[in-house]
Image: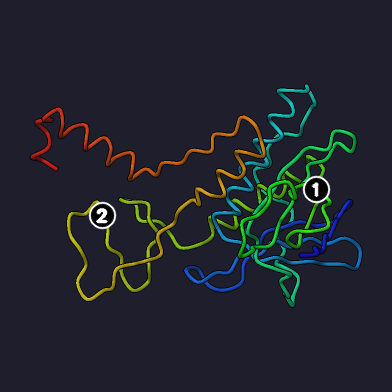
């Protein structure tokens, strides 16, 4: 299908933000240049991955090409909310990251979700056919700023259980590490996860990225399995 590419070469603002209360938040990315503001809806884990991989990309550029980069930002300067009203252009399905050496800029590409498998050749490309796209060129400093704010936005959700690190729900929480359950509550289905498809896609776009993912619970489950095979004498205490 014919695609619309919204390109921002000198954005004044590129931020992640949310609408709604913790536990029921909708995430958006919003870019502003001049009088134009474009918003796209995105998943929480995609925001987290994008923020993390932006830092990785800058570090890789320094390592490979010797280009000096600004240090990581502890606190974002832009803490203002999203510009209202929000009229999302699309829901993000795929993302692309690149480095424009000529412009000394990070290129962030956000592509609309589609029913059909995406042709990866359209990512970071001006192909006439493909999903609608928002393409943003960021200075290294702006990329650091985006990452710092995004991490804060993601962390501003529900508090985590100190035992299992899963989000705490207002109506109850079943802790996998408490060897029991809380009565008169429904099982929480709001388990946080990292989308392996998004990780794999980023791994193909940026050579050297570790696109594997294993949750802490999976790692501990594997450790328990190994202990059982060895006949760990501590098993009776668990």
User: Which percent across, then down, holds residue 137?
Assistant: 82, 48
The relative height of residue 147 versus residue 38 in the rendered view (above or below) is above
> In the picture, residue 160 is in which quadrant?
bottom left
- How far apart are the alpha carbons under marks 1 and 2? 45 Å
Crowding near the residue tagged with mark 1, few <14, some 14–19, many ≥20 C-alpha atoms within 10 Å: few
Q: Is residue 25 left or right of residue 104?
A: left
The relative height of residue 149 versus residue 235 in the rendered view (above or below) is below
> In the picture, residue 174 is in which quadrant?
bottom left
Helix, strand, or loop for circle 2? loop
- The quadrant of the image that shows the N terminus is bottom right
User: Which percent across, then down, holds residue 234?
Assistant: 12, 34
In the image, 77 versus 18, the foreground residue is 18
User: Disc 1 vs disc 2: which is toward the camera?
Assistant: 1
In the image, 73 versus 45, the foreground residue is 45
The residue where tag 2 is placed is 176
Going 60% across and 38% down the picture, which residue do you hit?
203
The residue where tag 1 is placed is 125
The relative height of residue 57 versus residue 161 in the rendered view (above or below) is above
Helix, strand, or loop for circle 1? loop
Going 68% across and 51% down the picture, which residue do you hit?
119
User: Which of pointers 1 and 2 lies earlier in the amino acid sequence?
Assistant: 1
């Amino acid at each position: 299908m014919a695609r619309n590419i919204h390109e921002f070469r000198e954005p004044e603002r590129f931020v992640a933000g949310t609408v709604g209360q913790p536990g029921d938040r909708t995430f958006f990315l919003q870019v502003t240049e001049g009088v134009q503001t474009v918003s796209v809806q995105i998943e929480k884990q995609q925001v987290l991955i994008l923020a993390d991989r932006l830092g990785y990309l800058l570090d890789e550029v320094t390592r490979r090409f010797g280009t000096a980069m600004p240090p990581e930002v502890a606190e974002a300067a832009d803490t203002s909310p999203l510009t209202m009203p929000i009229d999302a252009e699309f829901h993000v399905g795929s993302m692309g990251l690149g480095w424009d050496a000529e412009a000394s800029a990070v290129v962030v590409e956000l592509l609309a979700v589609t029913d059909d498998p995406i042709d990866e050749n359209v990512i970071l490309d001006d192909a006439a056919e493909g999903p609608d796209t928002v393409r943003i060129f960021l200075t290294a400093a702006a990329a650091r700023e985006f990452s710092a704010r995004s991490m804060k936005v993601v962390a501003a959700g529900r508090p985590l259980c100190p035992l299992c690190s899963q989000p705490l729900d207002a109506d109850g929480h079943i802790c996998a590490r408490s060897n029991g359950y809380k009565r008169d509550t429904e099982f929480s289905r709001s388990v946080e996860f990292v989308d392996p498809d998004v990780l794999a896609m980023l791994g193909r776009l940026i050579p050297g990225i570790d696109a594997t993912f294993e949750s802490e619970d999976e790692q501990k489950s594997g450790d328990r399995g190994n202990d059982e095979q060895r006949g760990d004498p501590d098993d009776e205490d668990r």
